[in-house]
Image: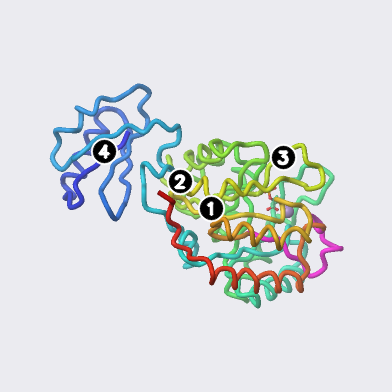
Amino acid sequence: MLILLKKDASRIEIENVKSHVLQLGFTPHEIPGVQRVAIGITGNKAKVSPDNFLSLSGVVDVVSVSKPFKLVSRDFKPDKTIVNVGGVEFGGEEIQIIAGPCSVESREQILEIAELVKESGAKLLRGGAFKPRSSPYAFQGLKLEGLEYLKEAAEKTGLKVVTEVKDTETLSAVAEYSDLLQIGARNMYNFSLLEKIGEMKKPVLLKRGFSSTIEELLMAAEYILARGNYNVILCERGIRTFETYTRNTLDLNAVPLIKKLSHLPIIVDPSHGTGAWDLVPPMAQAAVAAGADGLILEVHTHPEKAFSDGYQSLSPKTYLSMIEKIRKLELVLERTNEVLA
Ligand code: PEP
Ligand code: MN
């Protein structure tokens, strides 16, 4: 349920509505907006009567939201959310590029790739240090040592760090070293992790699980927002289908659909979405044309020697020429991010 207040509602009126919500045993969420002041209610198991609020000073309307996701929905917040990652904005006019290797493999490797990422004009460096691998025998990441190298690379280049958080045990360490916490496809349903991250203010990159629906992705984001962290960026990274020529099927429908359903920024990962380096440039362009707010890309100075995901990693040459094309495409697109009426 959503309580709408007049545009110029006073702080006293807003606080009064919030305390009424609390008295009824529910949770109020003040939703910032340009056009209106709104307070969302969560925690209600049954329908709450609008009469509880309609007579309060400043309240103009009470609307019920039938979708299972509330705080992430456009119904709750019509204005798009801009997530600020250490000064880099996701969801604004600029398409943000996150690039780097699948895994941090050594100090030299990440420093070299960070220089390349910097040269391309991208502002964020990716690299896994704690890797949740499908096989227990596969490279599991350099862990804390990897985080140290990422930090050094970021300090040298001025890039922001994006790295995956594998579990609640390592969350505080990973949060300390990163600007944007990545929740991987395998962890989209890790509700304890989502809740813990919801209690932080740190920006989050939430990837879609390989077998999850768009609604399930939005519900996972709802876990984070419900605990107070609104800094969530969604990521389409491909889903499992019957197709075997590609690692995943990149569901680009998700981009305009999520923009319609949610105010959160959405980026695309064509590296995991295709699983093949030569399919990455065309699908990256398609993602940007579909309205993606950014891309996350795997790039490696020696893809053939990569410890993980080498086959889908771009070589420096392909990466740089691809970014050039993306920037040209960005110029011809009118990125107003408006949802079609
Ligand atoms: C990754 O980004 O390297 C990764 C493991 O991605 P996903 O969680 O989408 O599989
Ligand atoms: Mn990878």
Q: Mark yes or no: residue 177 visible.
A: no
The amino acid at mark 2 is Ser
Q: In the image, which disc is placed on residue 242? A: none
The amino acid at mark 3 is Arg
* Residues under numbered marks 1 and 2 in contact, where contact means CB atoms less than 8 Å apart: yes
Q: Is residue 250 left or right of residue 33?
A: right
How far apart marks 2 and 4 lie (CA) works out to: 18 Å
Provide the residue designation for mark 3: 240
Q: In this view, which residue lies farthest toward the front?
A: 341
Q: Position of residue 14 (x, y in %)?
A: 21, 45
How far apart marks 3 and 4 lie (CA) works out to: 40 Å
Q: Nearer the viewer, residue 175 or 79?
A: 79
Question: Which residue corresponds to the image point at 16% horizontal and 50% vertical from the top-left?
Answer: 10
Q: Secondary structure at mark 1?
A: strand
Tell me if the residue at label 4 has its CB under 8 Å from ligand 1: no
Please provide the residue range marked out in magenta: 296-310
Q: Is residue 1 magenta?
A: no
Q: Position of residue 257 (x, y in %)?
A: 52, 45
* Residues under numbered marks 2 and 4 in contact, where contact means CB atoms less than 8 Å apart: no
Provide the residue designation for mark 1: 266
Q: Is residue 50 left or right of residue 93?
A: left
In this picture, is 341 found above or below 313? above
The amino acid at mark 1 is Ile
Q: Quadrant of residue 29?
A: top left
Q: Quadrant of the N terminus?
A: top left
Q: Is residue 301 magenta?
A: yes
Q: Earlier in the sequence, mark 3 or mark 4?
A: 4
Q: Mark yes or no: residue 319 visible.
A: yes
